[in-house]
Image (spheres, coloured by chain):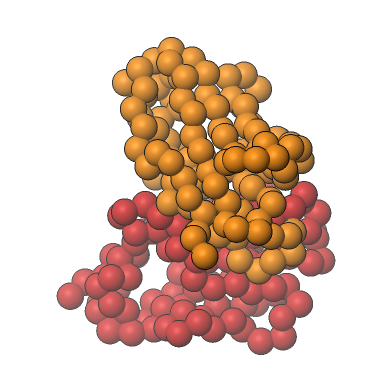
Amino acid sequence: NAGVMQNPRHLVRRRGQEARLRCSPMKGHSHVYWYRQLPEEGLKFMVYLQKENIIDESGMPKERFSAEFPKEGPSILRIQQVVRGDSAAYFCASSPRTDNTEAFFGQGTRLTVV
Amino acid sequence: AQKITQTQPGMFVQEKEAVTLDCTYDTSDPSYGLFWYKQPSSGEMIFLIYQGSYDQQNATEGRYSLNFQKARKSANLVISASQLGDSAMYFCAMRETNNAGNMLTFGGGTRLMVKP
């Protein structure tokens, strides 16, 4: 049973470009969470999605950031017109339900904006 | 107010000794869960141990144990017999049932360095 898969592992974008980060949850998991980790800081919640629904996006910046989890395929975190401050590690986690005792994390995508 | 506080930005420990990493939390939710994760230099988040707020006993997983003091709202991680491979960032996190789903709130982390 493969774990949470994120790709790419590393992504370099020039200022103004779009960044698209992908997350395939563990098999059987229908809940996906995205977190951002700035250098030397802890992870900060961004958005919680279930299939075809955004449940909680209270941690998402109001502009340029969007997320989706379609019926088929991976969850996508999209950052439009990236700026240097978007440089961070972006982690995805998945769970089969809302009460499990372990949150399974992917290996993260490290975004560098140059 | 910070929900999860880790007051030790960095810690040194001698190889083979035990070390305690501090974590205090703040919640009004009667039901919550506490997690510890390890993040080595390679960057992945490795789950170590979980403690539920209603669990009667402190959680243990191999060399990891969680010193859970509910009245003091602390959930310190104890690593016994430290190894060089334990050098990493360690994050304490909390899940509150008032939150939608399984969203976690993380502390700022503690960098542990194990000396040979």
> In front: B64, or A47?
A47
At a point 74% along the width and 53% down the height, the residue shown is B101
Tell me which corner region of the image, top left, top right, bottom left or bottom right, holds residue B57.
bottom right
- Left or right, residue A75 beside residue B6: right
Give the side of residue A113 with respect to residue A42, left or right: left
The part of the image, by quadrant, that contains residue A97 is bottom right
Report x, y in % for residue B46: 45, 63
- The residue drawn where x is 51% and y is 38% is A22
In the figure, is residue A97 to the left or right of B37?
Answer: right
- Answer with the quarter of the image where residue B14 lies: bottom left
Q: Is residue B27 visible?
A: no
Q: Is residue A27 visible?
A: yes
Judging from the image, what is the letter of the chain drawn in red? B
Residue, far left: B116
Foreground residue among B110 and A58: A58
Quadrant occupied by the C terminus of chain A: top left
A36, above or below A13, in the image: below
Task: Kindly indicate which chain is depicted in orange in the rendered structure.
Answer: A
Q: Position of residue B66 (x, y in %)?
A: 55, 78
Where in the figure is residue B80, as x and y percent of width and height?
A: 39, 83
B77 or A106: which is nearer to us?
Answer: A106
Asked if residue A25 is positioned above or below residue B30 in the image, the reply reads above
Residue found at the far front of this picture:
A72
Left or right placement of residue A104 versus residue A37 in this view? right
Q: Residue at 68% of width from left, 43% of height from top?
A: A48
Above or below: residue A43 compared with residue B15: above
Q: What residue is drawn where x is 61% and y is 54%?
A: A94
Q: Position of residue B110 (x, y in %)?
A: 42, 59
Count of numbered circles in the view: 0
